[in-house]
Amino acid sequence: MALELIPVDQWGFFTLPKPMVIAGPCSAESEEQVMETARGLAKEGIHVFRAGIWKPRTHPGCFEGIGTEGLKWLRRVQKECGLKVCTEVASERHVYECIKFGVDMVWVGARTTANPFLMQEIADALKDTDIPVLVKNPVNPDLDLWIGALERLNRAGIKKLGVIHRGFSTSEKSEYRNAPGWQLAIDLASRFPSLPFFADPSHMGGDRKYIKELSQRALDLGFDGLMVESHCNPSVALSDAKQQLVPADLGAMLSSLTVRERDSKDQGYREGIDQLRAQIDILDENLLYILKSRMDVSRKIGSYKKEHNIFIVQTARWEAILEKMIRKGEEYGLSEKFITAAFGAIHEESVRVQDEILEAGQED
């Protein structure tokens, strides 16, 4: 399904230079904290202020947000600092409260994105409004869930849509709080190229020391903007203290980032990149021919195994191939992760074509 979208430059939220930036504390904790942070961010050139009003926490008893009272503070930020304000919504009631207090934009959190029932409830509540909505990726790497959330909002008439990539929960050991999983975001961007993309390096990294490197990576990949957590005094923050920057440090970090262009009209660049892409096209065609030839051999192996009543999957043989290819890949400067993924896909397809031969014989 195609999404009907209003371009982000028509939202009236962001001004040049890029990247577009949304910043503010993880949670609105007090009126004083909200206003001090907002004033600091306005001084750094930030135009959109974020703050969590309702906080979905894993365990009860943790600080779960100040609630509706905090929306009054956001309204004060609008009036006194001239900033647009946004917050997270996770239910119909949250949406209605935000509308009542004139919140400029809302976002949907990772846990909510993964719940189609809640997404439909939020979409229905937002119907006939003109509020921009940003949708974070679901907790786990599920592209269909992410797209489904966007579709529900779009069908409700929400055309000012964007996404926030905040990484994924994983059981694997990682230096980051959430595994970046950039490829899934890239896949979504390739399907919806006009969809505004924000990265959330605060939740992705889980520590302020990672915010710059993750922000730069996002910009290098073509993301349109960043949502970064900022607090006037992170050491006393009631939630996610470790991943928040004071406004001045955020401003310095943003100034240090390299913002790249999507394209260039420089003739030298155009000629050079076109030549390199032509080489890639030829190599890709050669790869397809080699893969086709490999599968032809796999089919012959399948027929041979069938004639001799041999298992399709030969685990020892596959492990030996993979180990050999990983060593050879290292000689060519190719990572173990890449070789494992590439040859894993080739092996999976080889098993499939051999399985087809076996099933065809059983049908006969």
Image: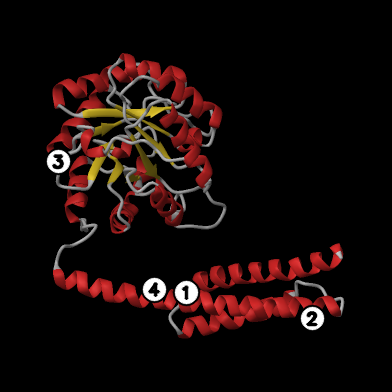
Q: Nearer the viewer, mark 1 or mark 3?
A: 1
**Residue 238 visible from this viewpoint:** yes
Name the residue that disc number 4 marks. 281
Classify residue 56 as left or right of residue 297. left
Name the residue that disc number 2 marks. 304
The Cα atoms of the two marked residues, 1 and 2, are separated by 34 Å
- Where is residue 316, by image quadrant? bottom right
In the rendered structure, which amino acid carries the disc numbered 1? Ser
Task: Check whether the beta carbons of the residues at disc 1 and disc 3 lie within 8 A of each other.
Answer: no
Which is nearer the N-term, disc 1 or disc 3?
3
- Badge 3 crowding class, 10 Å Cα cut-off, few under 14, some 14 to 19, many 20 or more, is some
The Cα atoms of the two marked residues, 4 and 1, are separated by 22 Å
Relative image position of residue 52 (x, y in whole percent): 36, 29
Which is nearer the N-term, disc 4 or disc 1?
4
- Badge 2 crowding class, 10 Å Cα cut-off, few under 14, some 14 to 19, many 20 or more, is few
In the rendered structure, which amino acid carries the disc numbered 4? Asp
Name the residue that disc number 1 marks. 335
How many dots with numbers?
4
The Cα atoms of the two marked residues, 2 and 4, are separated by 35 Å
Name the residue that disc number 3 marks. 44
Which element is circle 3 on? loop
